Amino acid sequence: MRLAPDMNARFLPAAAGAPDAQPDGPLPSAPELAGLVRASAPIGLPAHLQAVPGTLVSCRLPTRFGEFDLHGLQDPQTGAEHAAMSLGRLGDGEPVLTRLHSECLTGDTLYSLKCDCGAQLEGGLAAIAQAGRGLLLYLRQEGRGIGLVNKIRAYALQQAGADTVEANRLLGLPDDARDYSIAVTLLGQLGIRRVRLLTNNPAKVEALQRLGIEVVERLPLHMPQNPHNQAYLQTKSRRMGHYGPDEPV
Ligand SMILES: [Zn+2]
């Protein structure tokens, strides 16, 4: 049975239609994979590559910070696709140096100077690489959870003089709509219950602890300010309770 691809749902039609999947089979070799790709019959993918929503799929990912394992997971509730990058053995019970990063297209990818997200993403990966062991969770909740288009609306209001909190409120949106329950799902699937959290945001520490993750230590992650993000960083610390660079850890 072949199913029509539904790219929006991010389901894998070949896996959904495969009658002969081998649940515990080894990874196919490169020649075997080539054979699978050529085959016109439904593909017998190994179980760990069948992208069932809510389960992790993983591969190696060389980066300029080192060679990480990249994990992907689709939230079965929302359909959002989240990522995690891990380095070293994590499921041994020892606390894991962890960074929870929420997607910021403008800062992570488009080189925006309006926030510190891109620098924090790089700083988090560099800290994990330096430690030789750790995890970065990349959660797809753009604009503190309000989405890209709403973030652009908020930026337009900020251009007219509002700060980040005022802009969200003018749009009738929450100051911070992020939800960390998917992070706990990701941590659970990676066998992690104790973390050393790289963050300036006490709300992240509280959220993880409330969801059953032990935060044994908070480590600051401050990045240099620039004229474009100075006011934003001050608002985060003044109105949103984030720790500033001078706060004791
Ligand atoms: Zn940002």
Image (spheres, rainbow, N blue to C red):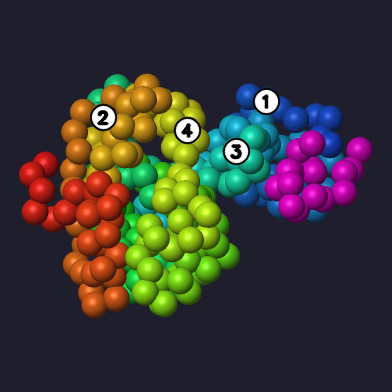
Tell me, yes or no, if residue 138 can be seen here: no
* Cα distance in 3D space between marks 4 and 2: 15 Å
The residue carrying pointer 1 sits among few (fewer than 14), some (14 to 19) or many (20 or more) residues within 10 Å by Cα, namely few
Residue type at tag 2? Val
Marking on residue 58 = none
Which residue position holds label 2? 215
> Which secondary structure lies at badge 1?
loop
Foreground tag (3 vs 1):
3
- Specify which label sits upstream in the sequence, 3 or 4: 3
Which residue position holds label 1? 23
Tell which of 73 and 174 is nearer to you.
174
Q: Is mark 1 within 8 Å of ligand 1?
A: no
Foreground tag (4 vs 1):
4
Residue at image x 23%, y 35%?
A: 196
Which residue position holds label 4? 181
Which residue position holds label 3? 75
Residue type at tag 1? Pro
Disc 3 to disc 4: CB gap under 8 Å: no
